[in-house]
Amino acid sequence: MISNDGSKSGFSGGEGAKYTHLFYEELFKNNPEGILLVDQKGVIIKANNEFTKIFGYTEDELIGANVDDLLTNNHLVGDAYTLTKRAASGEKFTFETKRLKKDGTTIHVSILGAPIIVDGIQIGIIGIYRDISVSREMRRMIQYERDLFNTFIEHIPDSIFFKDTQNKFLRVNQATLDKFNLTRHEELIGKTDYDFFAREHADKAAEDEQEILESGKPIIAKEEHEVFTDGTEKWVSTTKIPFTDSNNKIVGTCGITRDITPMKLAELKQAEYNDELKKLNIAKDKFFSILAHDLRSPFTALLGYSEMLKCECNNMEPEEVESIASSVYESAKKLYQLLDNLLEHSRAQLGRIKFEPANVQLVKIATSIIGLLSPNAERKNIRLVNEIEESLDMEADEFMLNTIFRNLISNAIKFTEEGGEIIIRAKLLSEVVEISIADSGTGMSPEETSKIFDNEYGFTHPGTQNESGTGLGLLLCKEFIQKHNGNIWVESKKNIGSTFYFNLPLKQSDK
């Protein structure tokens, strides 16, 4: 040994060998691994403290005993014998196996064995033992938990996924592969939602995951509308949470997505039914309101005039009888028109009016309705002008088209002052015919025009000579025009007049 000043110091000769022997003896005795020395026949020569602690024997009980007889049962003796033979042949070995303790319990140990060779001659075997029962059990439990986890996520019908901080897939289950029509996990790992979803949905998913990474707060059962790159749509309920490493640092997100498309479609259908039911209830309430109010007035007049004729006709002048008879006729006509509209409206609401499109000439329809309503117009000295070209024909349901023209022209007469004018026009716009009925009447305010086609309001207003109405006529027009895949709208100015427009396709598709 060399000292700091360069001089030699330390042990030498026999003294050095003594201390070297003590050093190795101490290393053998207090080594944290169990060490066992056996001779060529497997008889124990020496064991250290850790070995006695592992197996529960004292050193005196071990010395002279055969290692195979002492530490193995009948089931393991062949295994121990084979390994002893391997060491005896000069082969090093390492393995894990079971061994018996003094109290009869079995433990798992790892054994490193090697021959002891002195001057080229093998004189025995050294075995280094480590009790791995606890670590083996821990490994077994970890593997068991891993198997449970894998079995769970691979067989659950919900989509489960893990992503890194860049929103790239790290691990997915079979349901996720099925969702994206993939067969192997490798096809998905490293990809993002942008590879499978439309950009809008992928943007929103990435935004949610970034928020989780920053805040550490989960998103629970969020309803999402997934749109895939091929246009496929699904509704899902998604829960996403952060996952952390051993230092509690957020290193990604994991989530579970459940397909709720059938339930969502049923919910949307139910909402549609509820909306339709609301409209039907409004129509029903209006129907009964009309029955309760508007039918009473003409019936009251009709009954009153009839009673006068019954009780006083013998005392009346012919002119008085004629006047009352005329009033009875007008009341009956109004009552008929009202009942006709009510019946048509109720049939339309119940879907009992068949849609039967055929080739029609618009000018003939308009001419027919003008002829029917001319007496009404003449009484107010209103001029009816038909500017529809004779060559313009189209596909339409004739009954519905008659009803539309009758109601719109009748309304125009009702709201036009004496001496006014009503013009009916039609023009071809690409594959659509646009028809207009313009009057020089009282017109409407913007508030009124916003309500006239609304079932909820059922807008009605007295005419220029206090002609009454139910508001059903315009609703019928709207329903029949929509049946043709057309639209209806109005342009109006107060005290100037109104123009009602509606358009219908030239050809009707099959319904």
Image (cartoon, rainbow, N blue to C red):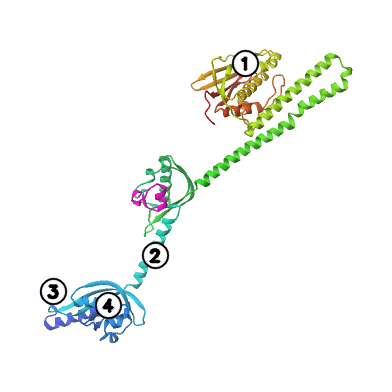
Query: Which type of secondary structure does the marked residue at label 1 adopt?
Result: helix
The answer to whether the residues at label 3 and label 2 have Cβ atoms under 8 Å apart is: no
Query: Which type of secondary structure does the marked residue at label 3 adopt?
Result: loop
Q: Which amino acid lies under the numbered mark 2 shown in the image of this protein?
A: Tyr
Quarter of the rendering occupied by the C terminus:
top right
Query: Which type of secondary structure does the marked residue at label 4 adopt?
Result: helix
Disc on res. 367 = 1
Q: Quadrant of residue 124?
A: bottom left
Q: Which residues are magenta?
A: 169-188
Q: Quadrant of residue 341?
A: top right
Tag in front: 4 or 2: 4
Q: Is 17 positioned to the left or the right of 451 in the image?
A: left
Disc on res. 144 = 2
For mark 4, what is the residue? Answer: 80
Instruction: Examine the structure image and report whether residue 290 is included in the region drawn in magenta.
Output: no
For mark 3, what is the residue? Answer: 3
